[in-house]
């Protein structure tokens, strides 16, 4: 079966000796390897104000904490995502207000978000779902006009671009995940990139119990309780070695994605997804809309190709019952969207077989 997701690990000969070195170095907590990963990530993102953290969820949590989001506040978010985007909002005590999805893009619709802004709106949470970048021209405008900060959940979209630059320096916060199945993995890990250098210091403290690492333990005074959200040297070294391959890994996702963009045009039963202006997806999952999705997935499976919608819409979970509202765009999208394999493991002959299977119909 050609899977939808698969972790990329650097070659054993390269990775294992480095892991051994760290494990027996006598220093496995946050140190040189962790800092090196963080620095290399800054270079990759072109943003020096980036911190490595324990997970994508931790990155999102830090963003919400820095905005002091809590009970009585509202965060406008998208139901079309992986659950942590929204569970992390729920744990702050804030109320989620669902924006609707544009059924042509699968992404949060700026017009819907604008209509849902109230005096309680503390943040707008965007997800660059499946590697496709939201309509940032319009979200930037909304944020500039209202002063409401945007958090970009870029867990699916490392290496995707807006305005010619990789995502990670547009909004006040951009959050990444290096969990097992993301384009870059450190087994578990994440990062938060800021476009405001002033957010870095308080974020560092929240990452480490509220302590200031520049001051000795004895001279420290915790003013706000923080978390254990940093990374260790093992995570760091895996990150350093895997990140060195990330551009070529991403290039393969992108090459496969562009191949499908061209090859699946005008295929009966298939509707391509539209990409927002001035954005370039990094195709974590290739997304299309199909008629008779169940039949489509069965046909693909019978040919050894995984195909599935993968994500459960967030708004139907009981924990978010308070936020329930009509979302016609989401309903429309949810009926027909599906993912097909697109990642680094999909070879030329695989993608050709995938296209011919689809062209033969279901
Ligand atoms: C994976 C993921 C996260 C959470 O990342 P973790 O590193 O698993 O905490 C958040 N948002 C989205 C959209 C994700 O896919």
Image (cartoon, rainbow, N blue to C red):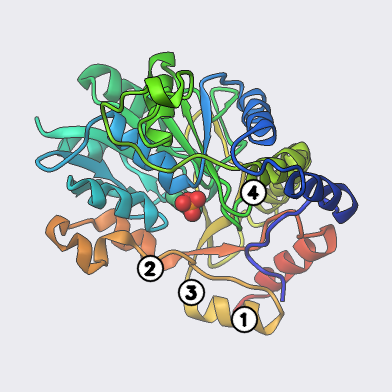
Characterize the local packing of mark 2: few (<14), some (14-19) or many (20 or more) Cα atoms within 10 angstroms: some
Reading the image, the residue beneath label 1 is 299
- Relative horizontal placement of residue 253, taking residue 316 as reference (left or right): right
The residue carrying mark 2 is 335
Residue 250: percent from left, percent from top: 70, 43
Residue 139 is labelled as: none
Do the CB atoms of the residues marked 4 and 1 lie less than 8 Å apart?
no
Residue 227 point in image, percent of width and height? 37, 41
Q: Label 3 belongs to which residue?
A: 293
Instruction: Select label 2 or label 4 by which is in front.
Output: 4
Is residue 180 shown left or right of residue 253?
left
Q: Earlier in the sequence, mark 4 or mark 1?
A: 4
The residue wearing badge 4 is: 186
The answer to whether marks 3 and 2 mark residues whose Cβ atoms lie closer than 8 Å is: yes
Inter-mark Cα distance, 3 to 4: 34 Å
- Horizontal and vertical percent position of residue 332: 33, 61
């Amino acid at each position: 079966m050609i899977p939808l997701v698969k972790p990329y690990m650097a070659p054993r000969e390269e990775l294992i000796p480095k892991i051994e070195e760290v494990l027996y170095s006598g220093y496995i907590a946050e140190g040189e390897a962790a800092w090196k990963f963080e620095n290399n990530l800054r270079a990759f993102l072109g943003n020096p104000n980036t911190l490595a953290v324990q997970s994508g969820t931790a990155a999102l949590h830090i963003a919400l904490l820095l905005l002091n989001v809590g009970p009585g506040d509202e965060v406008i978010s998208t139901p079309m995502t992986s659950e942590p985007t929204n569970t992390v909002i729920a744990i702050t005590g804030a109320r989620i207000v669902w924006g609707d999805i544009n059924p042509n893009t699968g992404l949060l619709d700026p017009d819907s978000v604008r209509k849902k802004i109230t005096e309680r709106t503390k943040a707008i949470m965007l997800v660059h779902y499946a590697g496709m970048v939201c309509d940032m021209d319009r979200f930037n405008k909304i944020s500039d006009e209202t002063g409401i900060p945007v958090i970009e959940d870029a867990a699916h979209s490392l290496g995707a671009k807006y305005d010619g630059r990789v995502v990670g320096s547009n909004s006040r916060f951009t959050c990444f995940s290096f969990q097992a199945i993301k384009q870059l993995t450190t087994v578990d890990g994440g990062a938060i990139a800021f476009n405001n250098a002033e957010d870095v210091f308080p974020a560092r403290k929240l990452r480490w119990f509220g302590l200031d690492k520049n001051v000795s333990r004895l001279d420290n005074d915790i003013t706000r309780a923080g978390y254990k959200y940093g990374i260790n040297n093992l995570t760091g070294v895996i990150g350093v070695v895997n990140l060195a391959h990330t551009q070529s890994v991403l290039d393969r996702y992108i090459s496969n994605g562009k191949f499908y963009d061209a090859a699946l045009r005008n295929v009966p039963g298939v509707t391509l997804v539209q990409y927002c202006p001035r954005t370039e997806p990094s195709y974590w999952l290739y997304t299309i809309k199909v008629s008779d999705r169940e039949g489509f997935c069965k046909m693909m499976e019978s040919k050894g190709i995984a195909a599935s919608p993968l994500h459960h819409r967030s708004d139907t979970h009981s924990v978010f019952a308070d936020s329930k509202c009509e979302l016609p765009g989401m309903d429309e999208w949810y009926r027909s969207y599906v993912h097909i394999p697109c990642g680094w493991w999909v070879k030329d002959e695989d993608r050709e077989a995938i296209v011919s299977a689809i062209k033969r119909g279901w």
